[in-house]
Image: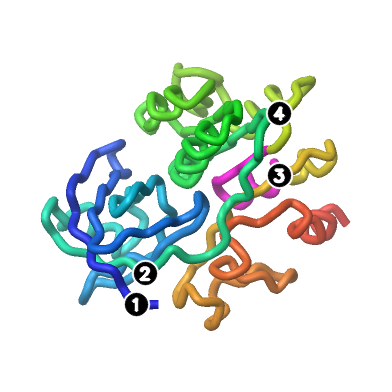
Amino acid sequence: MSYITGVIERIRDLTKNIKEYEIILEDRVEPEPGQFAMLWIPRVGEIPLSFADAEDNIVKFIVARVGRVTGYMHERLMAGDRVFIRGPLGRGFTWAPSGRALLVAGGYGLAPLYFLAKNLRIAGCSVKALLGFKSDDDIFYREEFARLGEVEISVEHGSSGYHGTVLDLFRSVIRGRSYDVVYVCGKEELNLAVMRECLRAGLPVEASFERRIKCGAGICGSCSIEPLGLRVCRDGPILDGRMIAPMLEADED
């Protein structure tokens, strides 16, 4: 797959360590929510990023400062700079045709879930989002999600919303309430815990998994999920609860 040239149209500070990049591409792309792209900066490096939004030839990515390439993006990239995109790659979310969808996000894991929420609303689904953050200063995209449906915030250290983890909030929300499907994106511990709860309840669930992706084509094996042999870049990043069930059962043995 060849690269598409993109020009940064706008950079928005979301928190101290998270920025939103709006990029205009030379060609139109049509990613499914949950798919990702490899973003390449010459002489700097290449990283995988989930699409946070896409319309015609305009895409958005939410980038947390976590390493060398993302650090360069935060410090050096400006509006007008060129970057190169390879994608869309991977497997996206399976959309619920109708009904009630519950979205569970940990921190910047909300990026693919926002893109999903937009599409679910267009399809006529009712959307409720649970967004988890460490502190009040870490909160972002609350207003964007609120335009699409109901939103609840959890904060571990602060005064906003529910006091505790987003997993605690999820457990309180799911108890005694009816949802048709659950989507989750966050750290792997959150993904697995939510999937375990949903499988026990017989509730369909999909999660976006993160691994160190190098090739993006399922060749190098750097993003393998063991012992299942699944490769995040090819079989995921979106994985169904039934695919992960053997891993959850092994954890309980």
As drawn, the label of residue 205 is 3
> Could you tell me the amino acid type at mark 3?
Val
Q: Earlier in the sequence, mark 3 or mark 1?
A: 1
The answer to if 113 sits in the magenta stretch is no
The magenta stretch spans which residues? 182-194
Which circle, 1 or 4, is nearer the viewer? 1
Q: CA distance from mark 1 to mark 4?
A: 44 Å
Q: Are marks 1 and 2 in contact (CB under 8 Å)?
A: yes
Residue 156 screen position, x and y as percent:
52, 28
As drawn, the label of residue 2 is 1
> Could you tell me the amino acid type at mark 4?
Arg
Q: Earlier in the sequence, mark 3 or mark 4?
A: 4
Q: CA distance from mark 4 to mark 2?
A: 38 Å
Q: According to the image, label 4 marks what residue? A: 171
Asked whether 72 or 233 is in front, the reply is 233
Dot 2 alpha-carbon crowd within 10 angstroms: few under 14, some 14 to 19, many 20 or more = some
Above or below — where is 161 with respect to 43? above
The kind of secondary structure element at disc 2 is strand
Residue 52 screen position, x and y as percent:
40, 46
